[in-house]
Image (tube, rainbow, N blue to C red):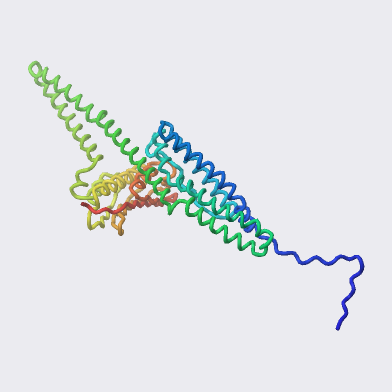
Amino acid sequence: MTSRTPRPAGRPEPLPPPRPALSARTWGELAYLGSSWIVDLAAFAYIMVWIYAGALLSLTVVGLPFLAAGLAGIRRVGGWERARARALLGLRVEEPSPLAPTYRGGGFFGWLWNTLKDPVGWRTALFFPVRLVWGLLTFVLLIPSLFVLWPLLPWLARGASQVDRALVRALLSPSDGLERRIAELEAGRVSVVDTSAADLRRIERDLHDGAQARLVSLAMELGLAKEKLLSSPEEAARMVDGAHAEVKLALAELRDLARGIHPAILTDRGLGPALSAVASRCTVPVTVHDELAARPAPAIEGIGYFTVSELLQNVSKHSGATRARVALWRDGDRLLLHVSDDGRGGADATAGSGLAGLAERLAAVDGRLVIVSPAGGPTTVTAGLPWRDRT
């Protein structure tokens, strides 16, 4: 039996070993849980005032704009809440796509319509009342835990904050990318509308400056020839010959214009023969490999035709290539169009070139454009379009 060594008088008892400090993650979760009810209460008051005032104003002309403005504000509050969840809970939630008018120059009514049908704003308006109940409950249970259940506090904070994480994911995050996809399709529709308007302006300009001008000149020439028919038959004959040449030029211009709208060979024989005809007019020798066993829908054929036509124009104008190749085939539910050349390369769809517009037009119909063009070449461009059978 050993005797205990007596402690010198006046020396204090040694301190107990320190308890492990809470981790930074736990402190963040506690801060989130402790402050959520304040955020939820303020947001809930905002939502109640917004709904009540909107109901009172619904019979006036400012009712819908007031509801839209309030919903836009709720959407912004949801963005702040996502930022708070990232900072305190470490929860990474994608930001939903911003609102955009349904058409270019939509103005006030475009903003009003898009805001009122915004699913992000409405789900955010649902989030705060639902979370308010949970936030008050966790705050009431959290205070006693700080003193009574200190050793279990990290697990309690983690379990309670998991409910908050689930609510944020369910109501504040884009639902499986649906909102983002809707925004992409709306942007694609804007691109299609703009492209169609530009094509109509181009056709009008070509008709006005080309064939129409020639036909006006032809009418004047024939009028003068008619006047000289009796007095100077030889001169009248020369004027008729000149008018005949003008007719040929006008017909050629109209034929080219019609080919630019929708070539007859595309309608009659399909995409492969139509692209072979385009390739024959290219300044660079082009080989065409057509592996299509069936024809897609006319709309898809038209988009594929003009896509390859524009790519071959780029080959002629900018590539400096000595040869090019076009291949088209079906891969499952996609139509693939491949254009390659041995030119200088450096093609870039992000540099504001025609390739950017081409990529936008393809995206509008759920298509994709993939460009591989290192400096020095070669360049390969693959366009993918959804396959739709002919009806």
Question: Relative to 317, is 26 above or below?
Answer: below
Q: Is residue 195 visible?
A: yes
Q: In the image, 197: left or right of 34?
A: left
User: Which residue lies at the image location 43% right of the left edge and 54% below the top edge?
Assistant: 176
| Residue 192: quadrant of the picture | top left
Q: Residue furthest left?
A: 230
Question: Relative to 221, is 142 above or below?
Answer: below
| Percent of width and height locating residue 66 | 46, 35
Q: In the image, 267: left or right of 178?
A: left
| Percent of width and height locating residue 366 | 35, 50
| Residue 263: quadrant of the picture | top left
Q: In the image, 250: left or right of 3?
A: left
Choose between 30 and 310: the one closer to the eye: 30
Q: Is residue 325 visible?
A: no
Choose between 44 and 98: the one closer to the eye: 44
Choose between 41 and 308: the one closer to the eye: 41
Which image quadrant: the N terminus?
bottom right
| Percent of width and height locating residue 213 | 23, 26
